[in-house]
């Protein structure tokens, strides 16, 4: 009888152990990267006071399978004028799921950041300079100010746009929009696309 009375206790202990084991085996949910099929760069010319001074025009890159998945995205050539300053905004979408990825990036601002590389931004003779100008004050790159040199050393360049996800924004150098060693700040790449640039 004593052994029978102890049996429910043993069963309870075994059940709790099994439950705890199942809990510990559950995978930790990670924030997955974004699938991006469409990227739009929108440029609005600004006057000396930083106010809009002209129409907004756009340049697109797209791949129906996803820019980081497909093999050959369609990319338009960006055309800007020497000596001008523009507000550049980035819109990104996942047309497969009909999702506005820009909205998700802004909601998770502390986990996302764009970097701007390539010959358009790199080196002492680079024709473009970029400054983060996001409304939230967080360094994201959804909105920024692009200034074109008045007398650029060359009229053709490459604008490489990289979106990193889940990076350490406090990593030394990560506050620079032209941080070439962005991989060292950790995280994953959601987007890496290069736009040809022509300066008029």
Image (tube, helix red, strand yellow):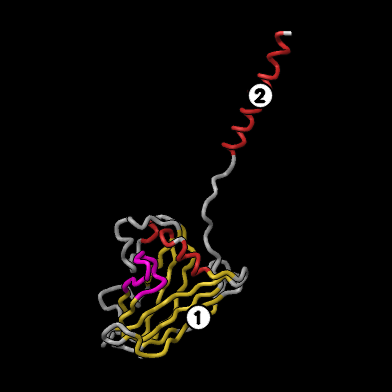
Q: Tell me where the magenta segment starts and ends, as one range.
A: 131-144
Q: Which residue is mark 2?
A: 12
Q: Dot 2: what SS?
A: helix
Residue 123, picture quadrant: bottom left
**Does residue 124 appear left or right of residue 16 in this picture?**
left
Residue occupying the point 64% across, 30% down: 18
Q: Report if the CB atoms under discs 2 and 1 are less than 8 Å apart.
A: no
Q: Magenta stretch: residue 81 in it? A: no
Quarter in which the C terminus is drawn: bottom left
2 or 1: tag closer to the N-terminus: 2
Which x, y percent locates residue 62?
Answer: 55, 76
Locate the N terminus by quadrant.
Answer: top right
Tell me the quarter of the picture where residue 10 sits: top right
Residue beneath disc 1: 60
* Left or right relative to 39: residue 10: right
Determine whether 175 is above or below 197 in the image.
above
Mark 2: give few (<14), some (14-19) or many (20+) Cα within 10 Å: few
Q: Is residue 147 rendered to the left or right of residue 40? A: left
x, y percentage for residue 14? 65, 24
Name the residue rendered at 35%, 78% in the picture.
120
Q: What kind of secondary structure does the magenta stretch mostly adopt?
A: loop
Q: Residue furthest top?
A: 1
**Residue 92 coordinates in the image, percent (x, y):** 50, 72
């Amino acid at each position: 009888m004593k052994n029978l009375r102890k049996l429910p206790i043993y069963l309870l202990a075994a059940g709790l152990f099994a439950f705890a084991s199942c809990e510990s085996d559950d995978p930790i949910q990670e924030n997955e990267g974004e699938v991006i099929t469409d990227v739009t760069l929108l440029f609005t010319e600004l006057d000396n006071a930083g106010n809009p001074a002209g129409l907004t025009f756009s340049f697109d890159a797209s791949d129906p399978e996803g820019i980081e998945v497909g093999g050959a995205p369609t990319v338009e050539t960006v055309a800007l004028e020497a000596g001008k300053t523009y507000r550049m905004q980035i819109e990104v979408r996942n047309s497969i799921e009909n999702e506005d990825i820009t909205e998700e990036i802004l909601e998770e601002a502390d986990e996302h950041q764009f970097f701007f590389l390539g010959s358009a931004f790199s080196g002492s003779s680079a024709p473009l300079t970029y400054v983060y100008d996001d409304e939230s004050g967080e360094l994201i790159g959804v909105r920024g100010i692009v200034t074109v040199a008045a007398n650029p050393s060359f009229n053709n360049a490459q604008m490489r746009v990289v979106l990193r996800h889940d990076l350490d924004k406090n990593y030394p150098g990560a506050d620079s929009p032209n941080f070439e060693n962005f991989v060292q700040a950790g995280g994953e790449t959601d987007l890496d696309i290069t736009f040809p640039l022509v300066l008029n």
